[in-house]
Amino acid sequence: MRITNVQQVNTTSIPVFLRLRWRLTTIFLMIAIVPIIFVTVLVVRQIEAQNRAQTFRQLESISILKQQQIALWLEAGRVELRSLLVSPEVRTAIQDPDARPREDAVLREVANISNIIDDIFFYDPSGLVMLSSNEALLGRVVSRQVYFDASLQGEVVQPPFFDVSTGSLALIATAPIYVDDALIAIGAIRYNIDELNAIMLERAGLGETGETYLVSSENNYFLTASRFEGYALNRAYTSDGIERALNRESGAGEYNDYRNPPVPVFGYYQWLPALGSGLLTEIDQAEVQAALSQVQLAITVLAVVIAALAALLGLVVTQRITRPLIQIANSAAAIARGKFDQRVQSQQRDEIGVLAAAFNNMTQAVQDRTTQLQAARDEALAAQRIAKENSRLKSEFLATMSHEMRTPMNAIEGFTSIMLNRMGGVEYNAKTERYLAKIQANSQRLLSLINDFLDLSRIESGRMELARMPISPVEMAQKWRENFSVLADNKGLTYEVTVDPNLPATIYGDEEALSKVAVNLIGNAVKFTEKGAIHVKLEKRGTTLALEVRDTGIGIPPHAREFIFDEFRQVDQSSKRKHGGTGLGLAIVQKLTRQMGGTIMLHSEVGVGSTFTALVPLVSEDLPETELVRG
Ligand code: ADP
């Protein structure tokens, strides 16, 4: 069995994004990737923030360390200065000019040993230097130096300044010396700036780009050197950090540093009042972020790997789900095309396995049922063939038999006629004559029955060939008129046959068949009409030829209209006794009409009359044989 109009299963016709496989994979991916992205972003942000906070903390602690180192260094210098102030030799030398050269030598010795102090010198309240570790200073007057005025008042650390006399940066601490509340001199030390540089250039914990440096509030000059080349001390530098430090603020920030072009740095700034300068601790953002970038890269790679694994897993899982489904769909399509041996192979023990098993069961059931149906149909077909053959054999037998019976019947009828006409010259008495008449009537009936049989069986066995000959409707009508005028007259009926003037003079067809239809219908009309009229019309109705036989007879009840066209069927059995007949006439009419490619219609009213109309195709030209409409 084949079932047509079945679409082949073709998953490629489903848009990709609708396919189960891709939808499931996408969902898997989403489930895996969205949290991964979320977590990754969160972790990276967190690390970034922590990194920055830690960098700031580190910069702050380095800055504070430097500040303390500087304070210690300054304090160490002041301690040395104080110890000199209380030294009796120093006091003696101040008051006794003769003792001074010896004391100068002692001071030189002290300055040499100390790595904090460069120079030691003492000057009187007028500013005249009287004692000094540095000979060049002796006899000079320092009253114009920046620290001088303040030094007369008390202990002072003078923030670094550019000393024009030495042409270098100077950091001076001073302390007054009193004798009996009278200021007799001021002691001063000049710090060794190299030591400050050493403190500032110590860069532990500052990586490749980190640095600490001091910027003086005077002119924004560097007090200590930059880590980078090309940035001289005695030039003005500025940046956000420098400005804030010199503004006496302290804190951390991200800003562009003093370099040219500026470099973004993380920085910590604070103000050192003792040095009158800002302490800056900075590191390039790029360096801090380089380490971070590695972590970010590692995390991103990890995330991508996890996502890829999730996608792969999703694909495998969805494959396991969709493959049996596609297989089932393919099998269903194959079954629809008639391939019932299709079974779904599934070892899965889940719902899909159950589905496959159910599908296989259904397929088996469909296969069994189809086999049964096929067998039943084959049987029915065989029975039908046999029945057809039987029917044909029956008709053939009837035709042969009727034909064979006609010859002796004709002889019987003929001889009976001869005898009745006394052609043998014999005299019969009335009784014999009556019998002879009965024999004749019966043999005539038998002959007409045999003729009907012969017609019917010829049509049914397919031996009836319709001719296509020219017919003159007018002449044919004339024959019908002549055939029945005597019978109609005898019953006192009006009988007329009319021909439609629109009909062509010559039509084509089988005159014998057409006349047989007419004769049967007219014969019935005469037979079942006691008074009134019989009207036969031959007319053109469009492309059909209509043969209409109308009578004013007994009519046919509605229920009988269904079966009177069947063989041997009459309206009721009493009709047979009264009117005779075999019930074959209308069967012949219907079969002949159909064979001519037409139909027969009936309108009737009991007690009013009946109208039979045979409609057959009107052939008005001698068409080639093949174009003839055949029944
Ligand atoms: P028959 O005339 O040999 O009985 P038909 O097949 O010609 O057989 O007609 C079948 C039956 O149809 C008739 O017996 C009759 O009862 C009914 N019949 C046919 N023609 C008419 C008619 N014109 N008027 C009334 N009844 C008719």
Image (cartoon, grey):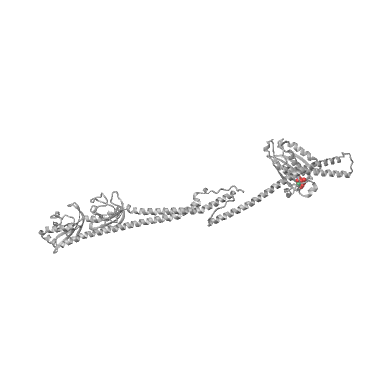
Q: Tell how many labels.
A: 0
In this rendering, does residue 554 appear at all?
no
Q: Return the residue nearer the eye: 578 or 14.
A: 14
* Residue at (34% x, 56% y) in the render: 51
Query: In which quadrant is the C terminus drawn?
Result: top right
Instruction: Mark yes or no: residue 30 visible.
Output: yes
Query: With 411 as the anchor, is 186 left or right in this view?
Result: left
Measured as percent of width and height from the top left, residue 121 is found at 15, 57
Q: In which image quadrant can residue 113 be found?
A: bottom left
Q: Nearer the viewer, residue 495 or 345?
A: 345
Residue projecting furthest to the bottom = 180
Residue at image location 38% in from the left, 55% down from the top:
44
Picture quadrant of residue 614? top right
Q: Position of residue 348 (x, y in %)?
A: 53, 56
The x, y position of residue 291, in whole percent, is: 34, 54
Between 288 and 143, which is closer to the camera in this rendering? Answer: 288
Q: Could you tell whether 342 is left or right of 434 in the image?
A: left
Which quarter of the figure has residue 194? bottom left
In the figure, 102 relative to 472: above or below?
below
Counting from the top left corner in percent of width and height, residue 426 is at 89, 40
